[in-house]
Amino acid sequence: MTVALSAVAVGDALTPLTYTVTRKQLVKYAGAAGDFNAIHWNGRVAHEVGLPDVIAHGMFTMASAARIVTDWVGDPGLVTQCEVRFTRPVVVPDDDTGATVEVTAVIGAVDADAGTARVDITAKFGGQTVLGKARATVALPA
Amino acid sequence: MALNEAFVGKAFPYPETYFVGVEKIREFARAIGDENPLYIDRDAARAAGYPDVVAPPTFAIAVIMKAQDELLFNPQLGLDFDVVVHGDQRFVHHRPIVAGDELTSTPFVDKVRTAAGNDLISLRTEVTDPSGAPVCTAYGTLVARGAA
């Protein structure tokens, strides 16, 4: 069962999500999404274009931002909008540990007439935010 | 190098239909580390009222990728793809994408500009079903770092 809109209030916090992303995960994502930009898997190319190292696909980070919302509502089909700005890269080292990203979220707005709630999402890597204006809108039953 | 202003406001319909498959949705879900049953389990998706497994909200990027690339790699546009990073992304889902969907993508160039030595291009891609009904509108900005 999903969440009822009447049970949601501005400021409510969602269950936090922490994940680790490795080079292997980026290769899997590149294949699944069809995004083979070399900065996401090739350290030489990343360095050549002035990046500190291989960086995660922004869309991989966005997928995790969306996940904190879908984990909450259960039914991903209730997400009617999601948006992010990519403000800092998630740098993924060539080791077995990878990079750890912490995702938190709160209810930013509830629109009873529209039957929607807006979720404001924060994603941090190394203590700094990596997304700006990260938001999702969910349509919830009354 | 400034981007070609002549692209602004134009539609670049991509001729190939994207056939959304069960295994592709599962592959994508597993690649983002999210095994929500509605992405993986057809029975669970049907029990929730869907015709088949549901795509994650950001799966639309895989649907539009080839259509966008066709436009972005057009040499007339002047985008230096070697230095491109993603600036922002927004999806408006008019309905969920599900396995079995046959989708067509039409990217539009909404804006090109130069800022702080970077070339920026804002795209809007309309994703529709075979009847022409809107399924998803994807807005994205790509940044060619230091290319301007």
Image: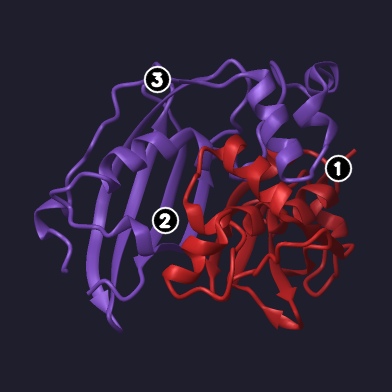
Chain colours: A red, B purple
Is residue A139 shown to the viewer in this render? Answer: no
Q: Which mark is residue B17?
A: 3
Residue at horizontal 69%, vertical 16%?
B51
The residue lying toward the viewer, choosing from B134 and A131, is A131
Separation of marks 3 and 2 at Cα, in angstroms: 21 Å
Q: Residue at x 43, y 43 (%)?
A: B137
Q: Position of residue B120 (x, y in %)?
A: 30, 67
Name the chain under label 1: A
Rendered position, A74 above or below B140: above
Whether labels 3 and 2 belong to a single chain: the reply is: yes
| Chain-order first, disc 3 or disc 2 | 3
Crowding near the residue tagged with mark 2, few <14, some 14–19, many ≥20 C-alpha atoms within 10 Å = many
Q: Which residue is mark 1?
A: A2
What residue is drawn where x is 26% and y is 31%? Answer: B13
Give, as a three-letter code, the residue at label 3.
Thr
Report the residue marked by disc 2. Answer: B140
The answer to whether tags 3 and 1 share a subunit is no
